[in-house]
Image (cartoon, rainbow, N blue to C red):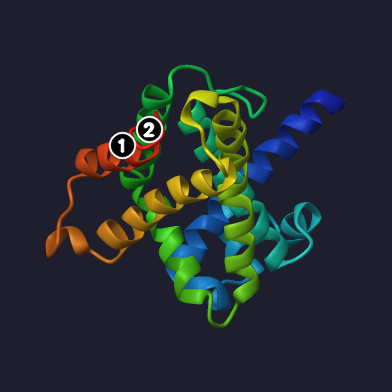
Amino acid sequence: METTTPTSERQLSTTKRSAILSGAMQEFLAHGYAATTMDRVAAAAKVSKATVYSHFQDKEGLFMALVQQLQEKKFQAVYGSPEGQRLQGPPRQVLHHLASTMLENIIEDKPFQAFMRLIIGESGRFPELARAFSHHTPRCFLSLLKEYLSTQSGLKLKDPEAIARIFIGSLVHYVIFQELLYAKEVVPFERERMITGLVDLIVNESV
């Protein structure tokens, strides 16, 4: 009789968790938050409903876990390193790279854009979902950027955290306006022009 080792059990658990999150993403995007059920997610993930509940307490917990997973993937895609990594290099180079990488990664990721639309569309009925997205997504980006700007004495910034928030907020606004609201079809604004202008506001006025 075959036995399952602790290591293989963990691997199986991780595989099932990944399948559940993938199935949840599929169902949330297809049916919205309200119409998605744990039964639907279980069917999409090809696992039992009991397995879904064993990994996630309820639908809200499943959604929160999905938000966290997406946030972690975005962080890795932009920074290319664990959260403990520090930003290094001259301000103009670092800020331009961050803005370019962040925008490229989000604009090329259509499922992530669809998820953002879902969050915005459901925020009226389920504000807790929007709060979770707003809490998790920019937090790690803001922390590292604030820390980096605080060490750049040459910039002479009075409020590094405010500048970090303005920087990230400008990028988020660009994505929402140009991509999610299709402004690029009626009032297009070139990505590189936006990035250069944003970096100039921080670097040129301070140095």
> Is there any visible trace of residue 42 in the rendered image?
no
> Is there any visible trace of residue 89 in the rendered image?
yes
Q: Residue at x 49, y 24 (%)?
A: 154
The amino acid type found where label 1 is placed reads Asp
Question: Residue 76 location in percent, x, y?
Answer: 53, 31
Q: Is 204 located above or below residue 38 in the figure?
A: above
State the residue position of label 1.
Answer: 200
Q: Residue at x 53, y 81 (%)?
A: 124
Q: CA distance from mark 2 to mark 1?
A: 5 Å
Name the outermost residue toward the bottom.
125
Depth check: 181 or 73 in front?
Answer: 181
Q: Residue at x 50, y 67 (%)?
A: 119
The amino acid type found where label 2 is placed reads Val
Depth check: 149 or 137 in front?
Answer: 149
Where, quadrant-wise, is the C terminus in this rendering?
Answer: top left
Query: In the structure shown, which secondary structural element does the residue marked by tag 2 occupy?
Result: helix
Q: Are the residues flagged by discs 2 and 1 in contact, CB closer than 8 Å?
A: yes
Question: Residue 143 location in percent, x, y?
Answer: 63, 39
Other residues around mark 2 within 10 Å, as few (<14) / some (14–19) / many (≥20): some
Question: Residue 95 location in percent, x, y?
Answer: 41, 31
Tell how many labels. Answer: 2
Other residues around mark 1 within 10 Å, as few (<14) / some (14–19) / many (≥20): some
Where, quadrant-wise, is the N terminus in this rendering?
Answer: top right
Question: Residue 192 location in percent, x, y?
Answer: 22, 38
Depth check: 163 or 109 in front?
Answer: 163
Residue 7 as seen in the image, left or right of residue 103: right
Q: Is 7 located above or below residue 173 in the figure?
A: above
Q: Which mark is residue 203?
A: 2
Q: Which mark is residue 63?
A: none
Depth check: 125 or 13 in front?
Answer: 125
